[in-house]
Amino acid sequence: MDTWFLFKEPDLEGLDDLGTVYSSVDQQLNEAMRRRRHAGENDYNIEVLLGVDDSVVRFHGKEHVQNYLLTLMNIVNEIYHDESLGVHINVVLVRMIMLGYAKSISLIERGNPSRSLENVCRWACQQQKSDPNHSEHHDHAIFLTRQDFGPAGMQGYAPVTGMCHPVRSCTLNHEDGFSSAFVVAHETGHVLGMEHDGQGNRCGDETAMGSVMAPLVQAAFHRYHWSRCSGQELKRYIHSYDCLLDDPFEHDWPKLPELPGINYSMDEQCRFDFGVGYKMCTAFRTFDPCKQLWCSHPDNPYFCKTKKGPPLDGTECAAGKWCYKGHCMWKNANQQKQDGNWGSWTKFGSCSRTCGTGVRFRTRQCNNPMPINGGQDCPGVNFEYQLCNTEECQKHFEDFRAQQCQQRNSHFEYQNTKHHWLPYEHPDSKKRCHLYCQSKETGDVAYMKQLVHDGTRCSYKDPYSICVRGECVKVGCDKEIGSNKVEDKCGVCGGDNSHCRTVKGTFTRTPRKLGYLKMFDIPPGARHVLIQEDEASPHILAIKNQATGHYILNGKGEEAKSKTFIDLGVEWDYNIEDDIETLHTDGPLHDPVIVLIIPQENDTRSSLTYKYIIHEDSAPTINNNNVIQEELDTFEWALKSWSQCSKPCGGGFQYTKYGCRRKSDNKMVHRSFCEANKKPKPIRRMCNIQECTHPLWAAEEWEHCTKTCGSSGYQLRAVRCLQPSHDGTNRSVHSKYCVGGRPESRRPCNRVPCPAQWKTGPWNECSVTCGEGTEVRQVLCRAGDHCDGEKPESVRACQLPPCNDEPCLGDKSIFCQMEVLARYCSIPGYNKLCCESCSKRSSTLPPPYLPEAAETHDDAIFNSSDLPESLMMPTSLVPYYSETPAEKKKSLSRISSVGGPNAHAAFKPNSKSSGANLPQRRAQPAENKTLRLASPPTKSGHLSASPQMAAAPFLAASDSIGASSQARTSKKDEKIIDKRRPLRSSTLER
């Protein structure tokens, strides 16, 4: 059988035979068994299907894999609960499926991550419950494997912004211990829309502090956070993921301890991280074993490796002590909480612009001290910014947003065609700090998948407020953040319009030939510009930049049509209605413009009226075509129409729409003629008050019980909210529309004791390190002596490689007799060095299958000149050395490097038995890897990005994690297509 399930999966192919339709149900009906988890109004819930293949199940064992996976997912959930994310997300496990061998190898194609991801996503889609209200209906699928699905070290792959999509909401992850939780969190972050920190955003400064989305991961259990860019990118998309808005059902998963390390020793965590046989490194002692978990294999006990993270919180580190936040602390149920406090600010960084108002940042960390034992995080933000280089640019005016769009001209293709991209202001104010551009050729708007640069104006209607990290920051005309100071009509900051002049005029000409015909000029500095035809005519209005000769409106070959566009750093509104053209902009104009017409018929008069406001120092000379005067209040706001009703039935609302009307003739004119602050507030009235039909709960028949006995059996049924239609049919709607309590969809069944069975524990390790020994395990009967069948064996023989027959000629060091070093007799190298003392102690040791007493902390001071090298403990004082090619060969007897993607460091004893002096130790650089001789662990991690396959249009990038010490960053393709990037990590070894 290819697939086996942790729990029996219900068969819900559809809802063919609906049961009784409930009009109301008692809210207390079995509420204890079927209730949805309470979530706050601002909570988002990712209901997860967790798929694991046979390689994971075999590695951890069927008896232990469930608790391991639950612990791993709890860690992922805690990562998403970190306050630095800015959004409260719950990662809720709703279903767990474990695959057999045949199905596992059919999904994972070695060396082909793209195909493997496609297979996994397709498989997850097939497992989806058809009823969205089913307790095991998932929003997102996470797949774990220990198979190598990509290049060496690749650990994760996922499509970006795929959340809630039926096929693309999934991730493929390589499982190799509890640190895989950061891989899963990272990949799920991509599915939520997050990019790598420092790639496509300006948060590269946070990667060294352990940001989850760093391309070179340095997050660890005691130090991780989400960067400010991750939070901003998440907020950009989170509101579009409707599937995360419902509350998840309660599930009967086994309860786990609050500190996950309580169930897992350091030896077990080493095995998870590096494979079978690995245990905590004993080649050297560290001051605090909880700082970093170092592991080694018995075949090479002096070669120690680490993933640069501490053991899990709750891991036993000494008698009566456990690890907590990277420190070995006394176990105390009432440990004193310590609230966090901010460290000092860094210096401000460089300015984002050289002129025209930029932004610079500084950061701080919550480490003075860090919060521990459940203490409060530091209040406030971990970064702040200030404006810089606020002076205007000296050269010809350039629109900063337009520059960013123009950079896409050469390489960004849209619908397989290159375009000339113009700036575009999104109508949604929440998206104005995202870079949208409009094609000059087609008018299509494309999202460039990035935020605008810091310092870009939020809106062309506000010349001072700017975008910072994807958020619009209010800036006054005095260039102070948060200031409410504004310009008057002619641009005087805090002015009272006393220096403003309104210029009006009418210009009439009759064309005699084809070709552009100049009408008049409008000077720079003009604001609130309005140009309008007095009467309908066949001619076409055109505008040209006098300084550059560039046509702003209706250049050669352009089609005249109503539109809103951006040019000269301002927004223009061009409208054609009943063959009368109107052009308006709030300005200010940075260059003079020429107003022209394109004649369509000769001898047909064209008459244009214009108006603009300008500072008196820039007012033009009065002539026959224009006059300078104060604005007269000859216009008023008037009711134009009613809006569409907000509901089709059940009583909706509609609101008044106002337009600007000229008092002299009651003619509706452009809204710019009326004062915006005098516009009346909308009036609301009821509409469509006819009664709607009410949605009702509908439930299917109960399925068979999942168990025949025991304490965990349950039954399921589908429950939906149905909306009756006037044609007699029903349609499924969201559960929030049904009144009354939801009928239970899960209930207990067959909760009777099962016949007693023998319970066996895992086999202990062999009692000897070589030759023939014994293994023991615990065998229990939970019903006293009433278990069925024979009692399973609790002791069996084990056979290891033959022991070395070399005779013992006595100890080779006087230190062999020290009791404090007796525990090193299990290390073959030490046993050979101190064979006489170790043989004497072996006869007095307790049976190997008995529980071992907790090891206490021993302190001893040795003279390094008297201690054999194999007994020397490493110290942070061991210097680093570089090695020339000529010296490289000499060091091979002392330093060994294991090939592969990981960076290694070795601690290997000298072959000489006397330890008069410590030989010189060298570190050899090879392929960007660092070799160190038993020196303390560093605080760095490695991930790199490289491009992968492209899939469907408008589907963004993917990611993978693996072991590589060299960061390779490929230039991101700017296309709006599905791109997948491998994300890599590495381990440091001793």
Image (cartoon, helix red, strand yellow):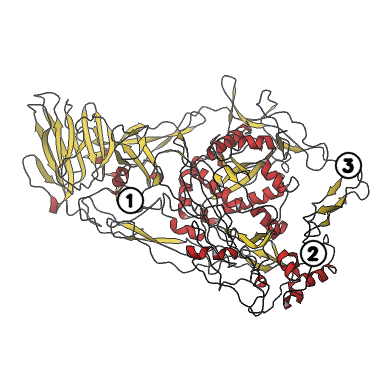
Q: Which mark is residue 511?
A: none
Q: Which image quadrant: the N terminus?
A: top right
What's the CA distance linking mark 3 and mark 1? 72 Å
Secondary structure beneath label 2: loop
Secondary structure beneath label 1: loop
Q: Which residue is identified by label 1?
A: 456
First along the sequence among labels 3 and 1: 1
- Res. 739 in view: no
Quarter where residue 876 is shown: bottom right
Percent position (x, y) of residue 18?
A: 68, 25
- Res. 244 in view: yes
Q: Residue at 12% x, 36% y: name it.
A: 506
Percent position (x, y) of residue 425?
A: 33, 42
First along the sequence among labels 2 and 3: 3
Q: Which residue is identified by label 2?
A: 852
First along the sequence among labels 2 and 1: 1
Q: Which residue is identified by label 3?
A: 755
Nearer to us in this view, 678 or 702 = 702
* Residue 701 located left or right of residue 387: right
Residue reaching furthest to the top: 727
Q: Residue at 64% x, 33% y: name it.
A: 129
Identity of the amino acid at label 3?
Pro
What's the CA distance linking mark 2 and mark 3? 34 Å
